[in-house]
Amino acid sequence: MLQLASNLNPPTRKARRHFDELALATMQRLQSLIPEGVFVRSIMRSGYPRPALGILAWFAFCGLVSAQTSEQKTARYLVSIRNQPSLLLRFAHDMPKGGDLHNHLSGAIYAEDLIDFAASDNVCVDRTTSQLLAPPCDTCEKYTSKPGIRCAYADHVLYSQLIDAWSMRNWRPGEESGHDHFFAAFDKFDLAVNGHVADAVASVVDRAARERVQYIEFMLTADGMNAAELGMKLGWDDDFGKMRARLRAGGLQEIAAATSQTLAEDQARVHSKLKCGSAEAEPGCSVTVRYLYQVFRGLPREAVFAEILLGFELASSDPRFVGLNLVMPEDWYVPIHDFNLHMAMLDYLHGVYPNVHIALHAGELAAGLVKPEDLTFHIRASVERGHAERIGHGASVMSEKDPIGLMQEMAKRKVLVEINLTSNDEILDISGDDHPLPIYIKYGVPVALSTDDEGVSRSDMTHEYLRALESYHFSYPEMKRMTRQSLEHSFLPGASLWATTTGEFRLVSACAADLAGKPTPACSRFLAASERAREQWKLETEFADFERKF
């Protein structure tokens, strides 16, 4: 065949030039597909005439393409649509997304749903500030200052005003910063969330399922602030041990029991609303939901301690609570002033409840929001003193003392960063090359994309994936790796499906040969013993289905 190729003589110079160009293009394509281009370089150094090289390269190229895995073909398709936004959006929508590990339930609700929740409770609204108010309400005439929220249904100006005030829709830089507009929204619609946890969960999980999110950890202050009120009532004590004993004896355990009961009732309502278990079951029934108890770190110290303690108690007694997190803007006065005190609380209670998982907001900061020195230690302290297994945001990591050393430590400890690209852009004005996401990856820190407050941001997980693809041109294997890491670093119980995640993900021996088909008895036993591994297996099955299309 090679002798025949070397004797080929195209009839015209133009045809020969075209053949040579095709041969060179094929060679270059092979070099892009074969690691380090070893095979191609050996052909090009062989001394064969270029027509022979073209035929040889063409046969090699055809063989390589036919031998490519479904993952490689999917990766090639992603490369081919890089400059076609509509196709890229559809790819991001259809790609399996694993878990959303950073999701505030109250901020995940779209404003349109919040209006419906408030209307069902006959709540009023201040026409000037867009803040919800308790009844009685004024009539719907346009000159009234406190109409019922139901009036918005017939008043398109008021309806649009509420959506803009309760979200980032139509926000433009001006007198009010993105940071201030974002966080002000929560106080305005807070009254609509009360009593509607089940409605909120049903709405969010159904949307998540339709865009192929399979697991969510909702942050929720599920006790309705009862622990904070108890803490304020009992007061402060510098001795954490005495304060813990006083809170537990003073009613905290009863608050924990009541919280678990309320959550069980809400979960039953979600099940009913989505028609789970019936032939008409909504997609949201397929989403696995767990909760992180949400501590308001902007409260007085005695209230914060009580809420942190309740978080540890709930995560120790109720399997639906898989950990806790501290929330509220990191740059506000109390979170800044009491930051080290909060780390001391976590350090003490971690010693009492060592098996409880902790995720912490840290580094949701930017230059100008706080003094320069306050940018230098929050992430490190959250990892080393707050015992955080995951960090939310981490946007200011390069302002930390020895940021490279910190990221190397995080990589060694396997501390994942929950990346919130949209909210970091809207709140901190950090995006693109200014965002540290590629730097975390460079130093081996595990990362996963998440939504943060998708309702307020007017975003969803699909657009978080799209933003990552457009901003950083991640390859399909890189996107797949982040997705796998979301479940690997979830707080679900049980062993991982992966024996190692350093370099490439490698399956545990019990399931090593099973992904292509039905699990063997040994793998089935392994999956039955681990909730985490079952979710990971489900994700791999979804990846296989997704990649089969390409």
Image (spheres, helix red, strand yellow):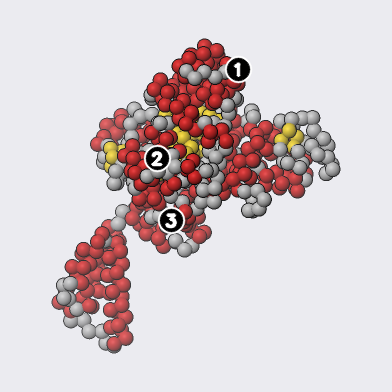
Residue under numbered circle 1: 233
Task: Give whichever of discs 2 and 1 has the lower sequence position.
Answer: 1
Give the residue type at disc 2. Leu
Q: Nearer the viewer, residue 142 or 7?
A: 142
Give above or below for 321 relative to 83: above
Q: Residues within 10 Å of mark 2 (few under 14, many from 20)?
A: many
The span from disc 2 to disc 1 (Cα, nearest Å) is 37 Å
Where in the figure is residue 150, as x and y percent of width and height?
75, 38
Task: Give whichever of discs 2 and 3 has the lower sequence position.
Answer: 2
Residue under numbered circle 3: 472
Q: Nearer the viewer, residue 104 or 305?
A: 305
The span from disc 3 to disc 1 (Cα, nearest Å) is 50 Å
Q: Quadrant of the C terminus?
A: bottom left
Q: Is residue 156 left or right of residue 410?
A: right
Disc 2, SS: strand
Give the residue type at disc 1. Lys
Q: Residues within 10 Å of mark 3 (few under 14, many from 20)?
A: few
Residue under numbered circle 2: 416
Q: Residue at x 27, y 32 (%)?
A: 522
